[in-house]
Image (cartoon, rainbow, N blue to C red):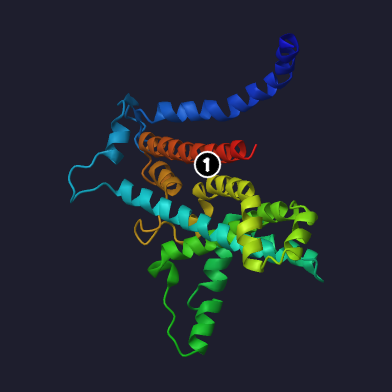
Amino acid sequence: MKKKKSKDFLFILPAMIVVGIMTQVPFLLTIIFSTLRWNLARPDLPRVFTGFDNYTHFLKIPSLQNVPEFYSILWQTIVITGSTLILCAVFGFLLALLFDHKIPGINIARTLILGPFFVMSTASGVIWKTTIFNTTFGWYGYFSRLLGAWPIDLLSYYPVQILIMLFTWQWMPFFILVLLAGLQGIPNDLVDSMKIDGVNWFQGTFKIKLPLIMNHMRVAVMLGFVFIIKEFGLILVTTAGGPGTRSYTLPYMVFMQVFNANNIGRGSAVAVMTVALTLLLVNLLYKSIKKQNERYA
């Protein structure tokens, strides 16, 4: 048996080597770059090893009155990602319930609701910014003036709220897809038993169906978290991180450090901290799923 297992391992070894090279080597290089003082705008300056100076530059708090900008951007990332996940989970579940019915045109509706998930972030961002939110040529500006109100630039006054709305619009179809698969996996016998026992809609939905698909919910949240926290294109083409840094996220901060400030070391340090935070939270979600499976095993 042990000999057979060792031979089975050889079949997946090439795939493991390729995946390791494609994922871990770039990450190790990023860690190495994060320990250097390396300015692309000054090729005459040597690359100097600085240890953890790039990390302490962002993490060190000189005083309560002088908190580094990194912490406000970290908080913005948590707010945007967390709010999007909550909205996607709540409305995704409710819409999945709606689509879990055999009614005329349901297949067309299911296809259309998945549309935003397949649109490129940059393309959808340009459409929302120019066609909808533009105060002069967009729908928002047109209908505001039609109602007698003077439109304000929503992307300037409410950048975080707008990004949360756009992220929810883009990623909610993914939640609907996963949760709908869970709902359709519930046995018909159980649904018929609920009707016979006189279970009302609220009890059947939130006390029976929702607990049965909680693993699907956790998987959707875990994958959605990975997808949403790395979102970059939508921010770039809509708010560009502004006004100021009010709509920065950690991935956007990496972009600005590397391509605007030309600082490879500090950009790499932020990237490493972002990956570490993502892995930590994904690990907690995975343990939650595993613990739930063991409880009902």
Quadrant position of the N terminus in the picture: top right
Q: Nearer the viewer, residue 127 or 91?
A: 91
Apparent side of residue 117 relative to residue 40 in the rendered image (left or right): right
Q: Position of residue 272 (x, y in %)?
A: 43, 35
Extreme residue in the right direction = 104
Q: 122 left or right of 64?
A: right
Q: Secondary structure at mark 1?
A: helix
- At a point 59% along the width and 25% down the height, the residue shown is 20
- Asked if residue 268 is positioned above or below residue 156 in the image, the reply reads above
Estimate the x, y position of residue 11 in percent, counting from the top left.
74, 19
Residue at the disc numbered 1: 285
In the rendered structure, the answer to whether residue 137 lies left or right of residue 102 reads left
For the residue pair 291 and 25, the one nearer the viewer reads as 291
Placement of 95 over or under 71, stated as above or below = below
The residue at 69%/55% (across/down) is 177
Residue 290 percent across, percent down from the top left: 58, 36
